[in-house]
Each structure stands twice: as structure tokens, then as C-alpha cells.
Image (cartoon, rainbow, N blue to C red):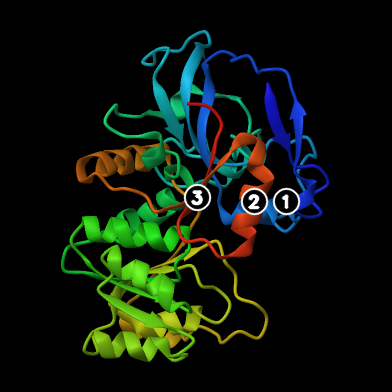
């Protein structure tokens, strides 16, 4: 099969095309023919050697996509040839609370990922795709969308009366916007780009704040909510934003931190204010298979259409990475492997 490998992880030029043996599904596993994959920011970090320790140079990257079942291993039931399926990249996190052991089964990181013509995965991790959903609707779900779902729905326990604040217009923030609007909530989006804020408004954002124009954006949030603050905050900003998010939070707000640590010298979170407001601060590392199944049902019921920036052919994968690295995109960057 055709595939891509990470190489020495010294930059985007490390990604290189190879020919590999097509994997055989073992007991309890399924072989998927890859149809469409989606890139995430961590795919850039991995290629640049910035996502923890460097990975095996022959690792196949990318952690979300959609595939078609073409072979069943022994002991597999509930799936049939021709089914389309997705899976959360922590394949051993089926349900329940997160465990550190899940980091040991992270597809695209510790195990070969989606950027190949075929991928073998435990059948128990798979979520079947309803026929009513397109590949484009489900390929981008298993990483940034699932993370947003975890933050807004599972941790945030969203209600229609809530105000949701999402920082920036990256993948998680845009999904948080769409998921929150599907639940009838009010949404505030920040960005440094008026053009991206205009897109956010078209997607349903009720309040938009340019944090370049308004560096005290937390005060703008309070002003826009008549001093109430945001009930759910999807904290993807990092660095200097954590302390500001606490300031922008309503009493009893739920703040989810998405895989970003503050730099040295960043303003410290006011712990006294966290206590005073009775805030919930929670780190989010993607989500479980059970969460993904609930997300897929909501995508189907609400007919949510992901924001797609661009789609590249399989042999154009390096160009897809370059587009992501440029930062000029809004929405998901997809790579079509097969149809």
C-alpha cells in the first residue's frame, strides 16, 4: 500500500511517501480502506519534533479520518464489509473516565495512523457511520470535534441558557461554536482577524471580539454579557489567556484547557477568584469512543456541516501540511485517499 512516514521530524520536509505491506487485521481487529483524512495542529507539531519525544521514523501519521471495512479479523462481530467507520485516536478509551494508559494507544502517535491506503484498528474502537452522513461530515470528527464535544457537552453540560466562549478560530473553537449553537446556546468567539470573525458570525456566533483591537477581551466579554460572564469556556488560547479566561468566567463556569500550557512569565491564574466564583477547571485530552458515538448521533440529527478549508489529493499531502502550517486556513484541511 501507499503511505507516508514521519521521518526524522525536523520539519515539514520530513514527511515522505513510501510503499509498505498492507497490514493484516489480528484477532478482534478490522482492516479499513482509508477514504478521507483530516489534519490537526498536532500533526504539524509531530513533524517538527515538538509533540513530546520524537516518534519512530517509520510511524504513519494523522489521527482522524473515515474508512471502509474491507477485512474482518477473527472474533469480530457487529461490523460488515462495506461499513464506514471512524474511531477516537485513543483506541483503548472506550467509555468512562480517562486513564494515563490511554496515551499508550494513540493512533498516529504511538501506533500507525490514517495517512495510508489502509489502517488496521481494534473493532471495539469503531463507530459505524450512518448512511445519511457524508465522508466530509465524519472525517474531521475524531480529534478536534471530539475535543470540543468533550469540553462543551461532557464537561460543560451545556444548556440552551448558557453562554459559551471559544478562543480563536482554530479547529476546536469552530467545532465548539457549531456544537454550542446546535444546543441553542449563545456563543462568543475571539480572533485577531476580522475576516475570520465574519465567518464565525455566519456560523452563528452571537458576539465576536477582535483581541488585537481589544487586548482586554475579557472585559469585552463581561461587557457583552452585562457582567454575567461566560458559563463554558473552551480554552485553546494558552500562554497569556488562561488568567483572562478566569476573569471572563461566570460563577460556576466550566473552563476546559485544551492541550496548551502557559509559557514562563505568563500571568498566573487568580486561584482566589477560582474559589470565589466556584469555577471548574478541567484539562481535556480528546475523548472516548462513547463520546464519539454521541457526537456522531448529534451530527446526524442536526445535519451539522463541518467548515472545510480545502481538500488535497493523497499525493499532495505535503502541500496539505504546508497549508495548515501557513495559518491562513479557516476550517478543516482534508486529504482524500480513496472514494
- Residue 274 seen by the camera: no
Report the label total: 3
In the image, residue 123 above or below residue 185: above
| Residue 204 percent across, percent down from the top left | 26, 65
| Residue 34 percent across, percent down from the top left | 53, 27
- Residue 196 seen by the camera: yes
Please state which of the two labelled residues, at mark 2 or mark 1, is closer to the viewer.
2
Q: Residue at x 64, y 60 (%)?
A: 325
Q: Residue at x 47, y 18 (%)?
A: 69
Residue 221 in which image quadrant: bottom left
Left/right placement of residue 305 relative to residue 84 reads left
Mark carried by residue 310: 3
Left/right placement of residue 243 relative to residue 1 reads left
Q: Residue at x 48, y 63 (%)?
A: 170
Asked whether the residues under the numbered discs 2 and 1 touch, taking CB atoms below 8 Å apart as contact, a structural biologist would say yes
Which residue position is annotated with label 2? 321
Q: Residues within 10 Å of mark 2 (few under 14, many from 20)?
A: many
**Label 1: element kind:** helix
**Label 2: element kind:** helix
11 or 73, which lies in front? 11
Left/right placement of residue 182 relative to residue 126 reads left
Mark toward the start of the polypeptide (2 vs 1): 1
37 or 56, which lies in front? 37
Which residue position is annotated with label 1? 47
Q: Residue at x 47, y 61 (%)?
A: 330
Please state which of the two labelled residues, at mark 1 or mark 3, is closer to the viewer.
3
**Label 3: element kind:** strand
Mark carried by residue 183: none
Q: Residues within 10 Å of mark 1 (few under 14, many from 20)?
A: many
Asked whether the residues under the numbered discs 2 and 3 touch, taking CB atoms below 8 Å apart as contact, a structural biologist would say no
Task: Measure how far apart labels 1 and 3 are at the Cα level.
Answer: 20 Å
Q: Residues within 10 Å of mark 3 (few under 14, many from 20)?
A: some
Amino acid at each position: 500500500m501507499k503511505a507516508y512516514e514521519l521521518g526524522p521530524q525536523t520539519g515539514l520536509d520530513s514527511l515522505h511517501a513510501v510503499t509498505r505491506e498492507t497490514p493484516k487485521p489480528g484477532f478482534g481487529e478490522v482492516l479499513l480502506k482509508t477514504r478521507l483524512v483530516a489534519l490537526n495542529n498536532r500533526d504539524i507539531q509531530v513533524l517538527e519534533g515538538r509533540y513530546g519525544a520524537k516518534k519512530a521514523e517509520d510511524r504513519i501519521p494523522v489521527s482522524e479520518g473515515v474508512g471502509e471495512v474491507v477485512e474482518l479479523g477473527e472474533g469480530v462481530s457487529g461490523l460488515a464489509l462495506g461499513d464506514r467507520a471512524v474511531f477516537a485516536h485513543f483506541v483503548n478509551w472506550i467509555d468512562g473516565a480517562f486513564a494515563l494508559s490511554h496515551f499508550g494507544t494513540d493512533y498516529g502517535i504511538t501506533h500507525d495512523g490514517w495517512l495510508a491506503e489502509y489502517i488496521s484498528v481494534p473493532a471495539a474502537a469503531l463507530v459505524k457511520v450512518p448512511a445519511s452522513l457524508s465522508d466530509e461530515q465524519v472525517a474531521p470528527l475524531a480529534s478536534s470535534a471530539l475535543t470540543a464535544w468533550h469540553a462543551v457537552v461532557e464537561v460543560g453540560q451545556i444548556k440552551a441558557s448558557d453562554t459559551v466562549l471559544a478562543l480563536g478560530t482554530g479547529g476546536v473553537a469552530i467545532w465548539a461554536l457549531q456544537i454550542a449553537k446546535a444546543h441553542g446556546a449563545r456563543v462568543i468567539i475571539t480572533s485577531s482577524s476580522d475576516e475570520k470573525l465574519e465567518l464565525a458570525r455566519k456560523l452563528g456566533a452571537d458576539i465576536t471580539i477582535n483581541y488585537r483591537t481589544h487586548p482586554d477581551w475579557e472585559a469585552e466579554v463581561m461587557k457583552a454579557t452585562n457582567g454575567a460572564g461566560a458559563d463554558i469556556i473552551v480554552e485553546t488560547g494558552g500562554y497569556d489567556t488562561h488568567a483572562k479566561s478566569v476573569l471572563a468566567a461566570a460563577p460556576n463556569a466550566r473552563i476546559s484547557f485544551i492541550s496548551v500550557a502557559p509559557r514562563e512569565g505568563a500571568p498566573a491564574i487568580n486561584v482566589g477568584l477560582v474559589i470565589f466564583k466556584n469555577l471548574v477547571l478541567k484539562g481535556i485530552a480528546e475523548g472516548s469512543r462513547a463520546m464519539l458515538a454521541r457526537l456522531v448521533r448529534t451530527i446526524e440529527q442536526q445535519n451539522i456541516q463541518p467548515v472545510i478549508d480545502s481538500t488535497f489529493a493523497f499525493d499532495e499531502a505535503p502541500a496539505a501540511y504546508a497549508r495548515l502550517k501557513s495559518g491562513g486556513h479557516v476550517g478543516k484541511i482534508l486529504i482524500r485517499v480513496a472514494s
